[in-house]
Amino acid sequence: MTKKSIIVLLSMLLATTTLGVGAAFAYTPGTGARFNDPYGDRAAENVSMVHIRKSIQSAEKGSIIRIATYSHSRADITNALIDACQRGVAVQMVINDNFISRTTKRLRNYLGSNIDPHFKDACHKRNKEKGETKYPDPSYLKVCFQSCRKGAGNQHMKFYLFSDTGEAKNVVMVGSTNISRYAARTHFNDLFTQANRSGMFHDYSLIHRQLAEDKRVKRVYRKFVNGDIVSEFGAVVRRGKQDPVYRRLNKVSCAGGTQIRVIMYAWVGDRGKFIAKKMAQLKKQGCDIRAILSQPSQGVKQTLKGAGIPIRSADMDLDDNPDTGFGETRWERFTHEKWMIINGTWNGQPQKIVWTGSENWSGLSFLNDEVTLKIPRGDIWAQYNAHFDFVWNNHTRAY
């Protein structure tokens, strides 16, 4: 073997060794909003799933991944999390108890469910006899009984935290996106990403720890302000004019034709109808309002249509067979998003604002662990507005 060949071989071995120590990939999660397209090709369906998976694969040794989700059924995500664990990344997941998939059970068996530091930590084993101390950030998969912080209801939030992945630190992803096949192939979802937000990462990590403890907290409602972004967790049960959505709408002025766009799954019940009546009032005052709905209640539809608000359904029966839809429905495609945007006067100022997160406009949401994110940015508003127009024009039907 020549001297040159030896040098090349040593360089390759060094590169391989370095890759094993750090992240498996070199992906830096881009910021802003993402929307999957369940009507598109595999890349379009999985745009958010790949974003999450590559962020896991790029997590650096010694970093932390924290996930809170309603459901998880993707083997590729489980594989990526186990690989991350094996290279020294702390993996912490909290999930609702409604559906425990085979791949969730596999991940739980691998990580365990002990949320406190312990010597047998799957990702950071320690030898007590050698005087080693427990790793301070244990890895686990915790299944909550009903909601985690409230008692009744469900753990319904969907957020993904990465302390160090690619070239980004303190990454926070929030939206309607669960990590499941259905979340990619069956319904539309959104996922908003921020990076290099240490305060936001800390605040969401605090909530994540409370979720993992799976017991009622005294202070259910938490509001965190990180720069221009406001995160609200665990809205308290406030009826009527104290409803958080109503209070947001009550700050809207329709002078100049303020535009309101809504995409909402499960806008239902007495609460849903009360919010719809407020929308009807704003329509009468001159606001430009449109809504895309999936599985709304009859009362909500009638209230909006009666006010002259244009609404369209994203519930689509593609094969004209009532027995082949998602769950107990006839719909092969629908939207699972839960957001509202405005372009106009809010709180006395001209603004473009996005509210997104995990909360359906229903009474049940008050019992759940939920998060709503307020993003007052024109560029993010433009992303959501473009997505609204795309779905409205291409993948909805008239009621």
Image (tube, rainbow, N blue to C red):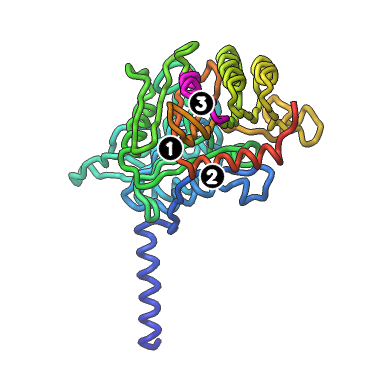
Residue 144 rendering spot, x and y as whole percentages: 44, 25
- Residue that label 2 marks: 34
Q: Which residues are magenta?
A: 244-258
Q: Residue visible at 40% across and 27% down?
A: 232
Q: Quadrant of the C terminus?
A: top right
Q: Amino acid at mark 2?
A: Arg
Q: CA distance from mark 2 to mark 3?
A: 18 Å
Asked whether 350 or 377 is in front, the reply is 350
In the picture shown, does residue 333 fall above or below 280? below
- Left or right, residue 368 beside residue 280: left
- Residue that label 1 marks: 67
* Residue ranking furthest to the left: 131
The answer to which of marks 2 and 1 sits earlier in the sequence is: 2
* Residue ranking furthest to the right: 320
Q: Is residue 338 visible from the viewing direction of this image?
A: no
- Left or right, residue 138 beside residue 55: left
- Residue that label 3 marks: 359
Asked whether 327 or 36 is in front, the reply is 36
Asked whether 11 or 290 is in front, the reply is 290
